[in-house]
Image: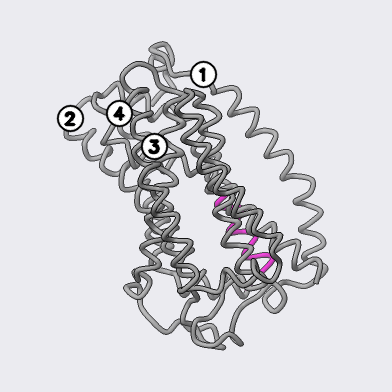
Amino acid sequence: MELQSIWFFLWGLLWAVFFLTDGFDFGIGTIYPVIGKTDKDKRVMLNSMGPLWDGNEVWLITAGGVTFAAFPKVYATMFSSLYTPLMLILFALIFRGVALHFRGKIEHPVWKNVWDTLIFLGSFLPALLFGVAFANIFQGIPFDGEGLYHGNTLKLLNPYGLLGGALFVLLFIVHGANWMAIKATGDLKERAVAMSSKAWLALVPVAVIFLVASWFATDLWNNYFTYPILFLVVLLNVAALLSIRFFTAKQAYFKAWFASGLTIVLCTFYGVIGLFPALFPSSLNPEWNLTAFNASSSPLTLKIMLGVVLVFIPIVICYQIWAYHLFKDPITDEDLGLDEAY
């Protein structure tokens, strides 16, 4: 029981870290055609995430790998039930990676416009679809006791699912705009700050509506009322969300970026805590829910994996902290002139 609970927490943590790190990449790509007025602006935006984006996506592989190894039944049912949106996410990420490298190969407006469009779609679609997918998981997926999905992709585009998609998109836009406020200078920096403020004003009501809708569409609140101390997560989330605006007004843009990242992590854990012990609930019959206890690998497998994680994950985290520190300074003309620049 303890091992399954630990791995449930680690499963949620890995998804939270992925949304924290790759979230600002998605946000930058989403606002890319809006605040990137010139080719130089766009190059600054691409190079602001250039040394980091591929490392950030490692957390997606890790989260998927942990789902497969620790909870194989969940992996099988999840990837069959959500096959279409997950494949769309995969192709969007592939095309975004290709676009980042190919955009600057030919100096022609049509060539660049094609790749610019793919950069936007490769950022916006994953942000939206991850939100839709997780919102649907929160309210339950229509699968039976054999793990067979009873529905189609359009069923996932329900009001609560789309609300989750909007929440994720706005969270990532704020996060990405805050990162651009750190990395850009001049007019681009001002536009990024303005985008962060505008997106935050839209994020707050969407977040409130999502919390209220979760009361009616899901069972997420049950654990909170059973264990009231868990409401600290919600209160901290509210504090982190409000502090984004506070730090932006103070022009403390790194603190604002940290606050938006913390908001993303706490939003993820709001859902994970509410789900426990279910990882993949069935909307057809609660008895068919896949939980941390009925869908996990053997205790020996979980023990071996825990040992590996305790050794290597801290190393990866330390490396990424070092990388973020190394590339914390604003992008300069000298940076854009490097051979490895986008």
Please name the residue that numbered disc 3 is placed on. 28
What amino acid is at disc 4?
Lys
Q: Around disc 1, counting alpha carbons within 10 Å, would you say few (fewer than 14), some (14 to 19), or many (20 or more)?
A: few
Q: Separation of disc 4 and disc 2 at Cα?
A: 12 Å
> Which is nearer the eye, 22 or 308?
22
Q: Separation of disc 3 and disc 4 at Cα?
A: 21 Å
Q: Earlier in the sequence, mark 2 or mark 1?
A: 2
Residue at left 43%, top 37%? 176
Please name the residue that numbered disc 4 is placed on. 105
Tags 2 and 3 touching, CB below 8 Å: no
Q: Separation of disc 2 and disc 1 at Cα?
A: 29 Å
Please name the residue that numbered disc 2 is placed on. 109
Tags 2 and 1 touching, CB below 8 Å: no
Relative height, residue 248 to residue 14 (above, below)? above
Q: Is residue 111 left or right of residue 47?
A: left
Q: Around disc 4, counting alpha carbons within 10 Å, would you say few (fewer than 14), some (14 to 19), or many (20 or more)?
A: few
Q: Earlier in the sequence, mark 3 or mark 4?
A: 3
